[in-house]
Image (cartoon, rainbow, N blue to C red):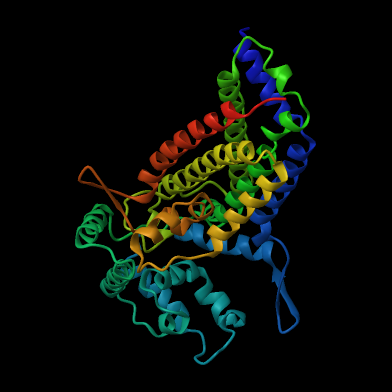
C-alpha cells in the first residue's frame, strides 16, 4: 500500500470518526424517512370528526389509479371522469365528503387533477368544464406559452421547446407513479438536509489540524504540502459522494417500499405538466437526484476551501448555512434574466425541481442546452477553480 493511499484512508477515517458526522447523519436519515412517509401518517378530519386514516385513503386511491393504468387520456376517459364529477351536487363546498364523490368521482380523481395541472384551471373551473380532449391540450399549450413569456424566453428558446413538444407522444397514457412522485415532491427537503450534513461534516477538515497542532505530524510524510492538500480534498469529496448517495438510496428504498416502483417509463408531463422535454418519470427522478449529488459535491469543495481560508469551523458552518438558506428564500425577478438564471444555479436553489426543470436555456457553441445539462459542467469548472484557490491558501499558510 502506497503512502498516498494510506494518507487518503487516514484522512477519510478522520472525517468518519467524528461524532458530529454520525449524529447529524442519523438525524437526517430520520427526517428523510418521516418526510417521505408523511402522507401516510395521521388521520383525516372534517369539522372535528375523524373521517379516515391517511394510510387507508392512500391505498383506496392507489387501487383506483392502478385500475386506470395504461389508459390513454383521451376523449373517452375525460368524459368518464366528467360524468362522475357531474353527479356531485352543485354548490357543495366540501364535495369530497359527499357519497356521490366517493362512489362516482373519486375513482377518476387522478384524471381530474391531471386536467387541472395540464390546463391551469382551478377546482371550480374544472368542475364546470366540458370534457374536450382537444380543448384540454390547447389550454396546456396556451399555459406553456404564458410560462415562456413570463420567463422572458427568446424566440429561439421558444422554438426549441416547441420542437421538444413534438417529440412527446400525445395523448398521454395514464400511469400509476406515486413512488416517483414522492421522491420528486421531497427532493428539496432531502437536498437541503444533504447540504446541511455535508457542511456540518466538512467544516472542520482543515481547521482541526491547525487548532490541534497535528499539521506538522501529517507533513512529516514524504509528501509535501501540495500533495497533502489534494489528499485531504479528495477525502472530503469522497465523503460527500458517499453521504449524498446514501441519502439518495435510502430515499429511493423508503419511497419504493411504501408506494411502489410502478411508472418508471411514464411521461414526465403526467407529473410536471408544464415542462416540454421528452423524458420519462424515472429519467426525471435520476436527473433530479443526480443534480442533488452534484450540488453536494460543489458545496463540499466550497466548505473545505472556505474553512482553510477562515481557519474556523464554526465560522465556516455559520456562513455556509446562511448562504444556503438565503439562496432558497431570496428570489431574483426574471426581469434580470442573467442574474436570475445564475442565481437559480446556486446549490441551495438548484436542489429544487422548479430550478432543475426551469425553461430558461443556455446556448453552448450554437446548441441549446437545458439547465440540468449545463449546470453539472459549470459546477465541475467552478469546483476546479475553487480547489486551486484553496491550494494557494493552504500553501501560503505558515505552520508554527
Q: Nearer the viewer, residue 215 or 339?
A: 215
Q: Nearer the viewer, residue 125 or 202?
A: 202
**Residue at (42, 45) in percent of width and height:** 283
Q: Is residue 210 above or below residue 43?
A: above
Question: Which quadrant holds residue 99?
Answer: bottom right
Q: Is residue 188 above or below residue 293?
A: below
**Residue at (29, 71) in percent of width and height:** 133
List x then y, in percent, for residue 360: 33, 58
List x then y, in percent, for residue 129: 37, 82
Q: Nearer the viewer, residue 355 or 70?
A: 355
Q: Nearer the viewer, residue 228 or 238?
A: 228
List x then y, in percent, for residue 126: 41, 80
Q: Is residue 104 above or below residue 68?
A: below
List x then y, in percent, for residue 172: 34, 59
Q: Is residue 306 left or right of residue 315?
A: left
Residue sitting farthest toward the bottom: 91
Split into 4 quadrants, where in the image is the N terminus? Answer: top right
Q: Total marks drawn?
A: 0
Question: Which quadrant holds residue 269?
Answer: bottom left
Q: Is residue 57 left or right of residue 208?
A: left
Residue sitting farthest toward the top: 1
Camera sees residue 70: no
**Residue at (39, 74) in percent of width and height:** 120
Camera sees residue 184: yes
Split into 4 quadrants, where in the image is the C terminus? Answer: top right
Amino acid at each position: 500500500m502506497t503512502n498516498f493511499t494510506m494518507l487518503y484512508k487516514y484522512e477519510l477515517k478522520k472525517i468518519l470518526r467524528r461524532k458530529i458526522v454520525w449524529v447529524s447523519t442519523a438525524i437526517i436519515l430520520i427526517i428523510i424517512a418521516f418526510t417521505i412517509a408523511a402522507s401516510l401518517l395521521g388521520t383525516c378530519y372534517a369539522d372535528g370528526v375523524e373521517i379516515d386514516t391517511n394510510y387507508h385513503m392512500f391505498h383506496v386511491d392507489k387501487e383506483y389509479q392502478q385500475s386506470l393504468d395504461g389508459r390513454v387520456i383521451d376523449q373517452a376517459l375525460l368524459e368518464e371522469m366528467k360524468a362522475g364529477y357531474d353527479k356531485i351536487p352543485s354548490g357543495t363546498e366540501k364535495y369530497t365528503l359527499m357519497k356521490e364523490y366517493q362512489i362516482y368521482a373519486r375513482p377518476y380523481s387522478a384524471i381530474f387533477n391531471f386536467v387541472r395541472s395540464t390546463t391551469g384551471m382551478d377546482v371550480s373551473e374544472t368542475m364546470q368544464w366540458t370534457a374536450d380532449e382537444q380543448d384540454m391540450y390547447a389550454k396546456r399549450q396556451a399555459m406553456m406559452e404564458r410560462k415562456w413569456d413570463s420567463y422572458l424566453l427568446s424566440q429561439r428558446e421558444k422554438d426549441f421547446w416547441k420542437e421538444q413538444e413534438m417529440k412527446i407522444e400525445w395523448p398521454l397514457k395514464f400511469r400509476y407513479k406515486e413512488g416517483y412522485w414522492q421522491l420528486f415532491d421531497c427532493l428539496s427537503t432531502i437536498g437541503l438536509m444533504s447540504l446541511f450534513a455535508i457542511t456540518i461534516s466538512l467544516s472542520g477538515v482543515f481547521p482541526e489540524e491547525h487548532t490541534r497542532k497535528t499539521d506538522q505530524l501529517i507533513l512529516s510524510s514524504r509528501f509535501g504540502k501540495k500533495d497533502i492538500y489534494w489528499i485531504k480534498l479528495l477525502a472530503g469529496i469522497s465523503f460527500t459522494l458517499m453521504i449524498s448517495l446514501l441519502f439518495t438510496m435510502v430515499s429511493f428504498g423508503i419511497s419504493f417500499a411504501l408506494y411502489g416502483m410502478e411508472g418508471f417509463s411514464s411521461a414526465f408531463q403526467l407529473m410536471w405538466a408544464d415542462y416540454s422535454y421528452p423524458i420519462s418519470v424515472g429519467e426525471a427522478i435520476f436527473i433530479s437526484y443526480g443534480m442533488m449529488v452534484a450540488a453536494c459535491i460543489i458545496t463540499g469543495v466550497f466548505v473545505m476551501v472556505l474553512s482553510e481560508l477562515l481557519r474556523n469551523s464554526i465560522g465556516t458552518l455559520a456562513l455556509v448555512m446562511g448562504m444556503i438558506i438565503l439562496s432558497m428564500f431570496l428570489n431574483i425577478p426574471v426581469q434580470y434574466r442573467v442574474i436570475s438564471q445564475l442565481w437559480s444555479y446556486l446549490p441551495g436553489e438548484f436542489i429544487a425541481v422548479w430550478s432543475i426543470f426551469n425553461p430558461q436555456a443556455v446556448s453552448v457553441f450554437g446548441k441549446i442546452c437545458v439547465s440540468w445539462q449545463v449546470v453539472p459542467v459549470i459546477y465541475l469548472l467552478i469546483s476546479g477553480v475553487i480547489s486551486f484557490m484553496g491550494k494557494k491558501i493552504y500553501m501560503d499558510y505558515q505552520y508554527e
